[in-house]
Image: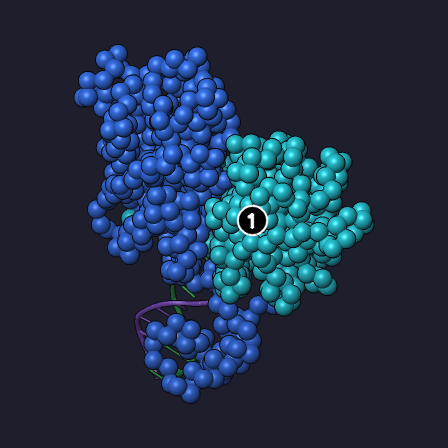
Chain colours: A blue, B cyan, C green, D purple
Amino acid sequence: MEHRSTIQEVAKRAGVSNSTVSRVLNKNYPVKEETRKRVEEAIEALQFKPNLLARSLIQDKSHTIGILTPSIENLFFSQVVKGIDRHTRPQDYITFLCTTDGDPGNERRMLDTLLNRSVDGIIVIDPQTENVKSGLYEKVGRRIPLVLVNGWYKGVDCNYVLNDEVAGAVEALGHFLREGHRRIAFLRGNRSHSYDVKEEAYREFLAEEGLEPKGGQVLRIADGNGQETVEQARRAVREALGDRQGTFDALLCCNDWMALGALRAVRELKLVPGREISIMGFDNTLISEIADIPISTVDHHMTRLGQTAAQRLFEVIGEPKQKTRKIIMQTDLVIRST
Amino acid sequence: MEHRSTIQEVAKRAGVSNSTVSRVLNKNYPVKEETRKRVEEAIEALQFKPNLLARSLIQDKSHTIGILTPSIENLFFSQVVKGIDRHTRPQDYITFLCTTDGDPGNERRMLDTLLNRSVDGIIVIDPQTENVKSGLYEKVGRRIPLVLVNGWYKGVDCNYVLNDEVAGAVEALGHFLREGHRRIAFLRGNRSHSYDVKEEAYREFLAEEGLEPKGGQVLRIADGNGQETVEQARRAVREALGDRQGTFDALLCCNDWMALGALRAVRELKLVPGREISIMGFDNTLISEIADIPISTVDHHMTRLGQTAAQRLFEVIGEPKQKTRKIIMQTDLVIRST
DNA sequence: TTGTAAGCGTTATCAT
DNA sequence: ATGATAACGCTTACAA
């Protein structure tokens, strides 16, 4: 392994002091044209690159941000990360990526690691409710720029970037209504803040519209957005629909995986999706787009979500003392074949 | 923003010197039980956490690795990253994630950034051939532990983790043969080392088996693994198959996106996949698994690929002077319905 | 315009 | 077993 040259060596070679080299590097103070030339030659000759660790230490600024996310292969999260990255790269910041497997303990540990590494800011995708609720993030947010994406808790003072899930659900349900559906069911996973919010919106909508006085039909499967979710959803819908004398003619699913499973059930029963029964997913991941029959969905614009979060983060990094903001993003209905 | 306490303050409060605190922290030298207690109390009281930047600077070891990848939302790459992460997290290393959009210039720039941040090692997923070929990575690999995943160039001395694409292709083609297919076509994207390797394997296989003396039928679409690839593949196959008096009865596709597109074409033509015509993808991403008709594919075990790369990287980090290795991973045929 | 020297928060070396 | 002190590689007053 070869030696990395330092600012001292450059200085020596150029016959100047290290401060002058630093000034040439940072262009923050006047340097005589001729000296600058000499220094630049020395830099070139020695292939000098400043050690950013040392710089970060003295400047108390690492030009580094951290992303905390439950997982990286999840289609939703990876899109958000992409959005963050898009905004971050041009700022010549660099990103620590930490996955937590959705475990609150891991989330706290990785958070600590990031803090100890003096990151300039942190974005948390789908923060664990437990950690939001406990005030952990409120505390962290007072120490260092922090943005929570897609997770929120009443009374907790943080920077948020959220989707308007209620509006999204209502818009989807309104679409069902306009299409002439009156018996609308709802398919959700086990526990997640976002599922709860959607279900509440669903129940309220039914009540307001005077539909299904018994409160509609809520189908529930285990958590998840992954392959296994598809099969679970298929079974649940298949069962609920019985011998195709189904009790509903429209189904709002909490994500695209569930919608795909529902679609499969519907096709097994030889029902015509989009005519005899309507299915709507949530998110607009590639799942809904590339499904054999493209699935209607509520687009969550994940990339935009990430970009907005990053933008907000850099605002706060630029001006740390400001008040927190809760940014609500709009969703959009994507009507496809189902 | 609150002040972060330093080792000095802990020392003062505990009535010892900073070296003693350091020793307590690192447990690398004997400390009297009683002193240790006092120091630990001070640490607790001040909520002291060591500044890892300072530690990295003096130790010349950042406990940090860098991942360079063309993109993060690509299903192949995200799985590899997941594999790396799985292996990295327990080592209490933390990961810089850099995306390059598959641009050689970006790749070089991000590489530089990583080096300037004193990462302890770097994994490059799908390194740009141009950069491998030019000797850039060979040079970097002599300075710092480096592993290239899924990219290789003759004569370039680096640590590699690769899939045996040739064996994978041959196994797939052998399967076609056993199924009774004799007119085998090949569908590839425009330019990629991996496509070239597969095509060569394909041609050799045909020659050896005495099939298609004219060299078989190679279909070519633009690069990519994304939604747009599906449509391009569909069109290409549709066209090649014409009025279903197709010139082939089996098709090997360079990735799962292409296979999905091919499958669509086949179904449009009312051919029965898996019987009248066989389709095989590459990679075993969720695309092939969740397709409406599950697609046969060559499993590239991306997660394992990532884990192996990380494992190899840490071997080299642990013992930097060793010779490079080229690790070839086996692929596996996954026979599904097509 | 440039040099000197202090300082960032640690760990490492050398005494004691 | 512990304390001084130098060092890591840089930036930044302060002086010249």
Check disc 1 and report the residue beneath it.
B239
Residue A47 sits in quarter = bottom right
Considering depth in this image, is B328 or B75 the residue closer to the camera?
B75
Residue A287 sits in quarter = top left
Amino acid type of the residue that numbered disc 1 sits on in the rendered structure: Glu
| Residue occupying image coordinates x 39% and y 50% | A84
Considering depth in this image, is B334 or B94 the residue closer to the camera?
B334
Considering depth in this image, is B292 or A153 the residue closer to the camera?
B292
Residue A6 image position (x, y, % from top left): 52, 70
Q: Secondary structure at mark 1?
A: helix
| Residue occupying image coordinates x 39% and y 49% | A83
Q: Is residue B310 left or right of residue B44?
A: right
Q: Is residue A266 above or below residue B200?
A: above
Q: Does the image show residue B137? A: no
- Packing grade of label 1 (10 A; few <14, some 14-19, many >=20) is few
Q: Is residue B113 left or right of residue A123?
A: right
Counting every numbered tag in the picture gives 1
Q: Is residue B240 above or below residue A170?
A: below
Considering depth in this image, is B123 or B19 the residue closer to the camera?
B123
Residue B204 image position (x, y, % from top left): 76, 52
Q: Is residue B90 left or right of residue B4?
A: right
Q: Does the image show residue A56? A: yes
Q: Is residue B44 above or below residue A24?
A: above
| Residue occupying image coordinates x 48% and y 54% | B99
Residue A333 image position (x, y, % from top left): 30, 37
Position of the N terminus of chain A by quadrant: bottom right
| Residue occupying image coordinates x 60% and y 41% | B244
Position of the C terminus of chain A by quadrant: top left
| Pointer 1 chain | B
Residue B318 image position (x, y, % from top left): 66, 50
